Amino acid sequence: MTTTGAHQDATGTPPRTWLWWGRRRTALLDIGLGLISAAECATQGVDFAARAGIPLALGVALGLLVGSLLVLRRRWPILVVLVAIAISPAAMGYLLTVVGLYSLAASDVPRRVLATLSGMSLVATLIISFVRVREDVAATGLDDPGVWYVPVMAGFIAVGSTLPPVLLGLYIGARRRLMESLRERADSLEQELSLLADRAEQRAEWARTEERTRIAREMHDVVAHRVSLMVVHAAALQAVALKDPQKAVRNAALVGDMGRQALTELREMLGVLRAGDETRPPGAPVPLAAVGAAAAAAAAAAAEDGPRIADVEDLVGQSRQAGMVVELSVQGEARPYPPEVEQTAFRVVQEALTNVHKHAAGAKVMVRLAHRDTEIAMQVENGAPDAAGSGVGAELPSGGNGLVGMRERVLGLGGVFVSGPTEAGGFRVSAVLPCGVSG
């Protein structure tokens, strides 16, 4: 099937079925051309019947049949052109020839077929025009206009009735194919943009999830440790309030210091999170492309301003003030590390001490740090819980996320994390971090 490209409407969606036309307007156009061609061929059939000596009704019927074939120009343009060439000796079907050649050139038929049929039509028209021009010159009885007149006029008629419709059809066909190509390209680009938008949404959702996880981990590290120490000091305060007022005052001061430190860290964290919202108008949506960058920036800012390995000594001192027996052992020479390595090392020790406060109150704790050439190792090991102090730890709730958070931090930096109970009834947390990670 060959078409001239009018089988779809402007929206690119297939319309209601109108045989091979697709649209009512196209069908009405071809039917109208078929009626005009049939009327033209029927009129010319009268002259053909008189010249050929056949009945008038037969000539008119032949003209009607041949002319009405123009209705098929979109479905079978080759058939229309072949019929037009076949009836050219009968001197009928001018509209059929012109419109048929145009439809053939505008369709998707191979170019060699178009060239062959156009050449055949040109030759047939040239022969018929030559004969008719010579008859007209002889019928006028005028002087001989010259041997060049008849062939030149026949050539003009043949070229004028063949070349323009073919060129116009080629132009319309090329333009139609170009529009279809542009439409397909636009559809392809729209699909690609939709796919990119979906991927951007997935990346944004992943970034939001990662940022929520990071924030939850930071909140857990800050709140769990500080509040655990505050609960331990509050229990001690309650125990010595009547017996030793001076110690109770010191414990109360420690509780206040712990609370202020926790509030300070929370304010700093919230300040980082709100920094990106200050320049955005209230109620404005967050651009998807900015979510990942904001998450990365917040993580980097938190790492730069976070705790360091040097703060582990203060951390151990706070646990000692809470009544825990803690020993700190440092091997190797301390040196600067990337911010995320320092913060992760600190958080591992902090969370391990917090777990001792919660689950092994009164147990002795050993904190080891080892500065090596390409890595830093840390280990927090506690003995069996002291029965006398187990009551405090039992009052501290646990969400079960501490070890998970430590593992995520260490593995995220390409390190090794191991935790588990010891043979003596205690618990050990060990981690090794590569120190070559850039900040």
Image: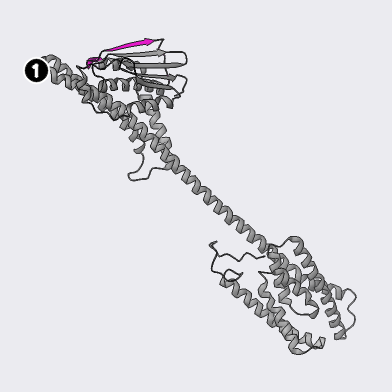
> Left or right: where does residue 385 sit relative to residue 165?
left
The residue positioned 58% from the left and 55% from the top of the image is: 184
Residue type pointed to by label 1? Leu
Quick one: quadrant of the N terminus? bottom right
* 127 relative to 234 in the view: left or right: right
| Residue 114 vs residue 323, the one in the foreground | 323
Q: Residue at x 27, y 24 (%)?
A: 225
Above/below status of 293 relative to 329: below
- The span picked out in magenta is 320-337
Residue 362 at what x, y percent from top left? 23, 16
Q: How is the image coloured?
A: one colour
Q: Which residue is drawn at 69% across and 81% down?
A: 38
Spot occupied by residue 286 in the image (x, y as percentages of width and height): 38, 42
Q: Eyeballing the image, is 60 above or below 193?
A: below
Image height check: is 304 above or below 181? Answer: above
Residue 53, position in %: x, y?
Answer: 82, 88
Q: Is mark 1 on a helix, strand or loop?
A: loop
Q: Which residue is drawn at 24% across and 19% down?
A: 361
Give whichever of 262, 205 is nearer the camera: 205
Q: Can residue 307 be seen in this view?
A: no
Tell me if mark 1 has few (under 14), some (14-19) or many (20+) residues whose alpha carbon lies within 10 angstroms of its own. Answer: few
Pointer 1: what residue?
242
**Is 333 included in the stretch rendered in magenta?**
yes
Report the residue that reaches farthest toward the front: 423
**Is residue 136 visible to the viewer in this orientation of the structure?**
yes
Q: Which of 327 and 57 is in front in this view?
A: 327
User: Compared with residue 3, is residue 150 higher up or lower down, i.e. above or below?
Assistant: below
| Image quadrant occupied by the C terminus | top left
Q: Based on the picture, tell me whether residue 360 belongs to the magenta stretch.
A: no
